[in-house]
Image (cartoon, rainbow, N blue to C red):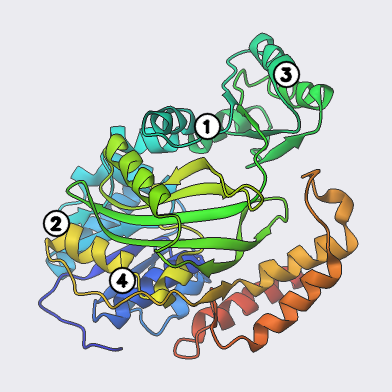
């Protein structure tokens, strides 16, 4: 560790250390001298392999009374603790149970604030009030209103859920899967998508297509002020037409300054405190950006922020948890971060399954993609979502898990 763990400070419990996000939180806190106790969903969670973990506890995937008791017991054992969560589902659960966890202090938003962030329709309405451009959006509540929206839309159209967590149980009850993003090229295709949800009587949002790449702006809000900010541009995504970042570049804060201020105004309008990502689609041709959503949690490309020294997990632990504002280093804004396994999947799709790419405007350039993938291994400023020579365990554990999945197939 860069600093010795301070036994006088409370440990930080991290719930959900099964992904690169949890590993990033562990590394950032551990290097700052915080005792990190990881609460893992399974025994093969990659976070359990990090050298920066003071202790790992397998609590299982269930979010029930048994987990409440286990967290209370751990809190009693340590005297007190600060608890961070990774996923939206875990944050939702903790918001409901925070008063039942004894001496453990939960870092999570207020319930009404979190609901506003999870509901994309509410977020888009608030965004318009602070001058942020939003895609034209319809929120159907019946098959009839869905068909009316089909007639009114410009194509292609994008289909996404206003609140995926709320929709998921109802969809699963009727044997329907939740897809993060769907594209419809014309009215007939959009109509067929809507008919699929008749059994559940719940429908997603319909949004106009907005071209470009993902621009993420990240803020730590405290007392209505942005005490730390960071931003990145997505270079490649999985799936290729849009999903989560597999390659992203840090951007100088001198860029998109007006948009940063509007993002901060939006977070104030929401009433947000703590860490959040405001995600846009940036049209390279026009320079215009349209809001996609707010992520009120640590995001998928969080390792880039860790490599850059942004300190968002430290702020959550120290500023929200202890009322102490840590001294953070200057940002390193010259980095690129990669998730190689997702990059390989993306390359396979582009090279061998281009027909599966739903976005009708996605530009397929196999030679460019192969050259960029190979060249990035030689970039001195390249970093990785999982690989870190100071902490190789999580990457090795991920490769082990991947090999086991292949063997089972």
Q: Earlier in the sequence, mark 4 or mark 2?
A: 4
**Disc 1 secondary structure class:** loop
Q: Residue visible at 67% across and 66% down?
A: 342
The tag on residue 162 is 1
The Cα atoms of the two marked residues, 3 and 4, are separated by 50 Å
* Tag nearer the camera, 2 or 1: 1
Q: Is residue 228 above or below residue 145?
A: below
Instruction: Give neighbour class at mark 2: few <14, some 14-19, many 20+ (Cα, 10 Å).
Output: some
- Image quadrant where residue 207 sits: top right
**Horizontal side, residue 366 vs residue 125: left or right:** right
Instruction: Give neighbour class at mark 4: few <14, some 14-19, many 20+ (Cα, 10 Å).
Output: many
Q: Which residue is mark 2?
A: 103
Q: Earlier in the sequence, mark 2 or mark 1?
A: 2
* x and y, in percent, of residue 382 in the image: 56, 81
Q: Which residue is mark 4?
A: 37
Residue furthest top as drawn: 144
The Cα atoms of the two marked residues, 1 and 3, are separated by 17 Å
The tag on residue 150 is 3
The Cα atoms of the two marked residues, 4 and 2, are separated by 15 Å
* x and y, in percent, of residue 265 in the image: 31, 41
Instruction: Give neighbour class at mark 1: few <14, some 14-19, many 20+ (Cα, 10 Å).
Output: many
The Cα atoms of the two marked residues, 1 and 4, are separated by 33 Å
The tag on residue 61 is none
Q: Earlier in the sequence, mark 1 or mark 4?
A: 4
**Disc 2 secondary structure class:** loop
């Amino acid at each position: 560790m860069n600093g010795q763990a301070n036994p006088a400070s409370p440990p930080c419990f991290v719930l959900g250390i099964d992904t690169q996000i949890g590993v990033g939180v562990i590394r950032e806190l551990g290097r700052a001298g915080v005792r990190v106790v990881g609460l893992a969903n399974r025994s093969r969670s990659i976070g359990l392999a990090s050298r920066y973990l003071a202790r790992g506890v397998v609590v299982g995937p269930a979010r029930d009374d048994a987990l409440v008791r286990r967290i209370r017991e751990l809190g009693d054992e340590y005297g007190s603790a600060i608890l961070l969560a990774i996923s939206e589902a875990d944050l939702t659960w903790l918001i409901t149970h925070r008063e039942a966890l004894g001496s453990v202090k939960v870092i999570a938003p207020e319930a009404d604030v979190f609901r506003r962030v999870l509901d994309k329709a509410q977020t888009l309405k608030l965004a318009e009030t602070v001058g942020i451009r939003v895609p034209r959006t319809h929120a159907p509540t019946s098959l009839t209103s869905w068909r009316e929206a089909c007639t009114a839309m410009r194509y292609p159209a994008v289909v996404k859920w206003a609140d995926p967590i709320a929709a998921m149980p109802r969809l699963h009850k009727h044997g329907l899967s939740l897809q993060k993003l769907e594209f419809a090229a014309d009215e007939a295709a959009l109509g067929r998508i809507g008919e699929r949800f008749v059994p559940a009587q719940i429908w997603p949002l319909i949004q106009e297509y907005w071209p470009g790449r993902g621009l993420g702006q990240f803020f730590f809000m405290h007392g209505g002020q942005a005490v730390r900010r960071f931003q990145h541009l997505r270079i490649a995504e999985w799936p290729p037409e849009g999903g989560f970042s597999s390659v992203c570049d840090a951007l100088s804060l001198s860029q998109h300054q007006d948009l940063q201020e509007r993002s901060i105004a939006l977070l104030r309008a929401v009433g947000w405190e703590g860490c959040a990502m405001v995600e846009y689609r940036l049209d390279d041709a026009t320079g215009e950006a349209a809001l996609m959503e707010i992520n009120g949690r640590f995001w998928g490309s969080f390792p880039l922020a860790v490599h850059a020294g942004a300190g968002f997990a430290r702020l959550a632990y120290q500023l929200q948890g202890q009322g102490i504002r840590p001294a953070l280093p200057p940002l390193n804004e010259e980095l690129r971060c990669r998730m190689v396994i997702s990059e390989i999947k993306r390359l396979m799709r582009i090279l061998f399954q281009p027909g599966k790419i739903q976005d009708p405007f996605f530009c397929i350039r196999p030679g460019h993609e192969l050259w960029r993938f190979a060249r990035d291994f030689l970039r001195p400023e390249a970093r990785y979502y999982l690989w870190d020579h100071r902490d190789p365990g999580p990457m090795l554990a991920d490769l082990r898990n991947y090999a086991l999945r292949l063997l089972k197939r």
